[in-house]
Amino acid sequence: LYLVFHNQHCTRHSMFGSCGLTVFTITLRLLANAQEQTCAADDVSCFFNEKLTTSTITLNDGNKIPIIGLGTWVASRTERTREYWDAEEGELYSSDKSAAMSEQVLTADKEEEELFKNAVITAVKAGYRHIDSAVVYRTESVVGDALQQLYKTADIKREDVFITTKVPRQYRDMKQVRDGIEASFKLLQTDYIDLYLIHSPHSDAEEGKRGTDVLNIYRLLLDYKKQGRIKSVGVSNFGVQHLQSIERNGLPLPSVNQIEVSVFLVEEELIAYCQKKGIVIEAYSPLAQAKEPATSNELLIALANKYSAKLDRELSFAHIMIRWCIDKGFVVVPKSVTPSRIVANGNVFDFQLSAEDMKQLDALKQTNYRICWNPLHEEWDV
């Protein structure tokens, strides 16, 4: 409940303010920012957003994927993975390296795990039903532990949650890939995984055969799909030529292509191809990691103010960027470990951007601002 006392001579809302009251109105409304201040520390379930639970897109294999997911990537953790694990020698990222880490590094690693565990719990209590993980992030065990806790304490079952993970770029030996997939089931503490992606099209095969190793991994994922242990098979950071190769080799097209997308970075040819072929685009780094181009962009600020006034609640650049992705037909996986931001990122279902505003936002693609790696043009020979 929020009581608003309004005076035509006053410029601000006031609770029993001193300026002379001439008009008295009572408005009942849910304010995301007010909720965050009063509930986040104690009970995130008070933010439950049913639209997060029910808003889905149907994939080309008939399975449904929630439109908004929680990302669980952080650069420092991935860098640590590459520093302490030697996947090129067949080592799995799930192996225990704690003995090799200094106390300081181990503490940082454990602190990140706790942050991500709390983020997953916060997200699911808030209504999220889609959690994005990856082998190289080393967040599978965190996701698994968080979900097991939720299954016991919250009104949620395994079938309510859509879990994604990924074969890392460094896994190209087939035994290593298979062992990694089996490790994913154990770490996530699940009998099946909803979506398994190949994280990138990088190939370690010799020239003339480049891409054959990635296609073999794709075939293995399809075998798991036939067994029912993987529900949907997808790719990440694949360009048009890689998708064409999959089709040319007589394989079914992936259900999802997870790529970096934001209002500042739009791979138009790739997106058009995927949409034509029925491959869902899943946008990672949709907020450009909340870096300066996003936070200070005048158009995003103006649109946030415009829709704030329409909805009578506070919106930010993040709401506009996420809503732009949704209105484009993308699945979107913003990442945060801050409870208030996790809740806010999901609070985008009570408005749509107008055609004119979409047109203005589309023009921002000229910035071509990329945050992450770009394997879209890795060469294949097959």
Image (tube, grey):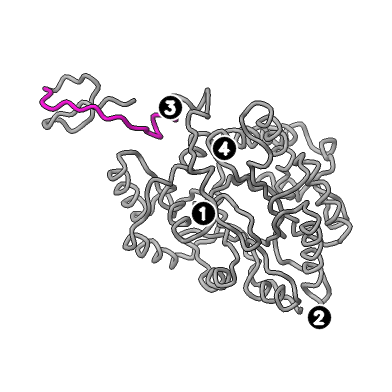
Q: Nearer the viewer, residue 70 or 380?
A: 70
Q: Which residue is mark 2?
A: 208
| Residue 73 appears in the picture as rendered | no
Label 1 or label 4, whichever lies nearer to me, is 4
The quadrant of the picture occupied by the N terminus is top left
Which one is earlier in the sequence, the residue at label 2 or at label 3? Answer: 3
Q: Which residues are magenta?
A: 20-36
Q: Amino acid at mark 3?
A: Gln
Spatial distance from mark 1 to mark 4, Cα to Cα? 17 Å
Q: Which residue is mark 1?
A: 286
Spatial distance from mark 3 to mark 4, Cα to Cα? 17 Å
Q: Which residue is mark 3?
A: 37
The quadrant of the picture occupied by the C terminus is bottom right
Q: Tell whether 238 sits left or right of 26.
A: right
* Mark 4 surroundings: few (<14), some (14-19) or many (≥20) residues within 10 A: many
SS for tag 2? loop
SS for tag 4? helix
Question: To which quarter of the image does residue 157 belong?
Answer: top right
